[in-house]
């Protein structure tokens, strides 16, 4: 390189002299310069503290830099214009009419946002006035009076109290109609208010009672949900094809007709009945003595709760029917026992139950035959089954296929039951009275019938004497049972009935 060029510091290229290069500087200097410039710019953007007016964004000149803000402002303006138009239309539509239609719901701008609308300054909710709501009277201060001197008004003031009472009617139950006189500045005297209050309470209690009664009665007419479920389960399991309808609703049971399905190892008759023992416990209270003193159930009875006792009734009927069937007494055949539901064969045909002896239109010959059959069946029951029906009457004897059938044996007891003979005497009286009334001349009187069934030879004389003898015999029976000790063999083995289905929730 040329010495002269080097001396002047101007580099000289083959095409001429080159412009001098800028003086070299260090990187930190460049960076701090940039930082200083940046801070300077930021300072310029912030309003200066010395200019207080600059602090506040100008109302007249809103920041229009943001597109969104701009769009919203335009929309608001548009909505207000729309609402103005709506108001005009509303006014035009309603004119002078006393009944006006409000377009309020079509407004675009919520009254709260539309604060610069001159018409709607007051919050519309506050302006609502319910004319049927009593004005809350002014509360009396704690000192108990307001005013001074002559103008003192105590909290006992008639008018204040009256208004207070009127307002307190608001607290009555909603179903109590207090009328629309509240807006009339009514003043109810304490006496009137108290009797209204009293009436209101007793009405409430009465309606609650009525409601309860209604619920109970519906439950009684049909069956409770648990029972319904059990019945559906039987249909689901195929034991029943169909449950058709109710044959009878008695005090203690509801009887349904059903089409039989199939049950393992046991053919189910085409037509069956479901006797549902009612779980309304009250009805069974006065029947305790039939089961409580029946030694077959005695032990279990004392340990059971009332709902389970009702199952015991169904079980008892099942065992008694089984005993009777073994003695070939015409009676329903047990199909299945499930809790308090007993399924048994239907006495009747094509959904028509056999008539009760009470309703059967029998010829005198048939009536005579019926009497002899009943006498024989009572003897069979007593001697072969060791049972006293204990509710035998023309209501529980059916006439079917030219002969009598005995039903309803849940309460039947053994003759050794402490009241067994008394029950037998009552059965005899029912039977004797019925057939004698029906003109069966050879029908025994109650005492003869009793002796004929029981095989006892109680001298027939005065009724009191006869009954005294019966009670004495019962006492002797009881002593005998006591001496023998408790007879505790399981009834299901003895009677060979279908196995009891015990559910998990038992
Ligand atoms: P309750 O204890 O309610 O008197 P019952 O066993 O006497 O119950 O049945 C009531 C009625 O249902 C009977 O009077 C009878 O008409 C009808 N009934 C009951 N069982 C049968 C049955 N197996 N076949 C046909 N009808 C029956
Ligand atoms: Mg009956």
Image (tube, rainbow, N blue to C red):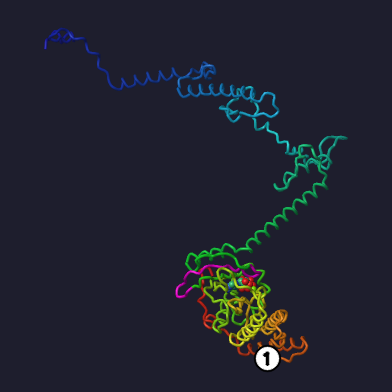
Left or right of 89 in this view: 68: left
The x and y percentages for residue 318 are 56, 77
Q: Is residue 117 above or below residue 386?
A: above
Q: Is residue 209 above or below residue 321?
A: above
Q: Based on the displayed image, in which of its 4 quarters is residue 278 positioned?
A: bottom right
Q: Please tell me whether mark 1 sits on a helix, a strand or a loop.
A: loop
Residue lying furthest right: 150
Q: Is residue 67 visible?
A: yes
Q: Is residue 311 visible?
A: no
Depth order, front residue of 106/152: 106
Say which residue label 1 marks. Answer: 456
Query: Is the N terminus in the top left, top right, bottom left or bottom right quadrant?
Result: top left
The x and y percentages for residue 217 are 66, 62
Q: Which SS type dominates the magenta stretch?
A: strand
Q: Is residue 96 above or below residue 249?
A: above
Q: Based on the displayed image, in which of its 4 quarters is residue 462 positioned?
A: bottom right
**Magenta extent:** 249-267
Query: Is the C terminus in the top left, top right, bottom left or bottom right quadrant?
Result: bottom right
Left or right of 297 in this view: 438: right
Mark 1 CB near ligand 2 (8 Å cut):
no
Q: Identify the residue at image location x=83%, y=35%.
A: 147
Q: Is residue 62 above or below residue 131?
A: above
The x and y percentages for residue 297 are 59, 79
């Amino acid at each position: 390189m040329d010495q002269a060029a080097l001396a002047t510091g101007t580099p000289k290229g083959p095409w001429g002299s080159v412009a001098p290069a800028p003086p070299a500087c260090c990187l930190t200097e460049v960076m701090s310069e940039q930082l200083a410039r940046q801070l300077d710019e930021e300072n310029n953007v912030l309003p200066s503290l010395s200019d207080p007016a600059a602090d506040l964004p100008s109302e007249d000149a809103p920041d229009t830099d943001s597109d969104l803000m701009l769009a919203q402002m335009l929309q608001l303006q548009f909505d207000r214009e729309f609402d103005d138009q709506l108001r005009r239309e509303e006014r035009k539509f309603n004119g002078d009419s006393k009944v006006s239609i409000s377009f309020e719901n079509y407004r675009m701008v919520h009254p709260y946002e539309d604060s610069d609308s001159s018409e709607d300054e007051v919050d519309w909710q506050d302006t609502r006035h319910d004319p049927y709501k009593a004005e809350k009277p002014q509360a009396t201060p704690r000192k108990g009076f307001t005013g001074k001197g002559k103008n003192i008004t105590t909290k006992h003031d008639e008018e204040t109290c009256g208004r207070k009472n009127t307002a307190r009617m608001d607290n009555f139950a909603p179903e109590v109609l207090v009328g629309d006189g509240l807006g009339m500045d009514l003043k109810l005297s304490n006496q009137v208010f108290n009797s209204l209050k009293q009436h209101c309470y007793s009405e409430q209690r009465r309606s609650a009672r009525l409601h309860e009664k209604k619920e109970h009665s519906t439950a009684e007419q049909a069956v409770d949900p648990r029972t319904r479920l059990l019945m559906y389960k039987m249909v689901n399991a195929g034991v029943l094809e169909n449950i058709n309808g109710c044959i009878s609703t008695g005090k203690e049971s509801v009887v349904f007709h059903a089409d039989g399905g199939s049950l393992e190892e046991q053919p189910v008759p085409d037509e069956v009945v479901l006797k549902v023992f009612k779980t309304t416990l009250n009805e069974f209270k006065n029947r305790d003595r039939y089961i409580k003193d029946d030694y077959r159930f005695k032990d279990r009875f004392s340990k059971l709760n009332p709902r389970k006792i009702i199952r015991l009734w169904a079980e008892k009927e099942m065992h008694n029917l089984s005993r009777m069937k073994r003695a070939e007494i015409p009676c329903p055949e047990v199909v299945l026992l499930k809790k308090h539901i007993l399924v048994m064969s239907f006495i009747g045909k094509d959904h028509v139950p056999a008539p009760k002896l009470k309703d059967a239109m029998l010829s005198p010959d048939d009536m005579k035959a019926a009497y002899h059959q009943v006498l024989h069946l009572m003897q069979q029951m007593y001697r072969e089954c060791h049972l006293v029906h204990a509710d035998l009457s023309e209501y529980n004897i059916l006439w079917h296929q030219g002969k009598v059938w005995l039903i309803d044996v849940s309460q039947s007891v053994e003759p050794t039951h402490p009241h067994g003979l008394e029950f037998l005497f009552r059965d005899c009286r029912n039977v004797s009275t019925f057939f004698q009334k029906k003109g069966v001349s050879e029908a025994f009187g109650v005492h003869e019938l009793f002796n004929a069934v029981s095989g006892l030879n109680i001298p027939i004389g005065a009724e009191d004497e006869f009954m005294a003898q019966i009670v004495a015999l019962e006492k002797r029976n009881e002593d005998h049972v006591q001496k023998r000790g408790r007879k505790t063999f399981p009834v299901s083995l003895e009677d060979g009935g279908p196995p009891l289905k015990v559910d998990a929730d038992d």
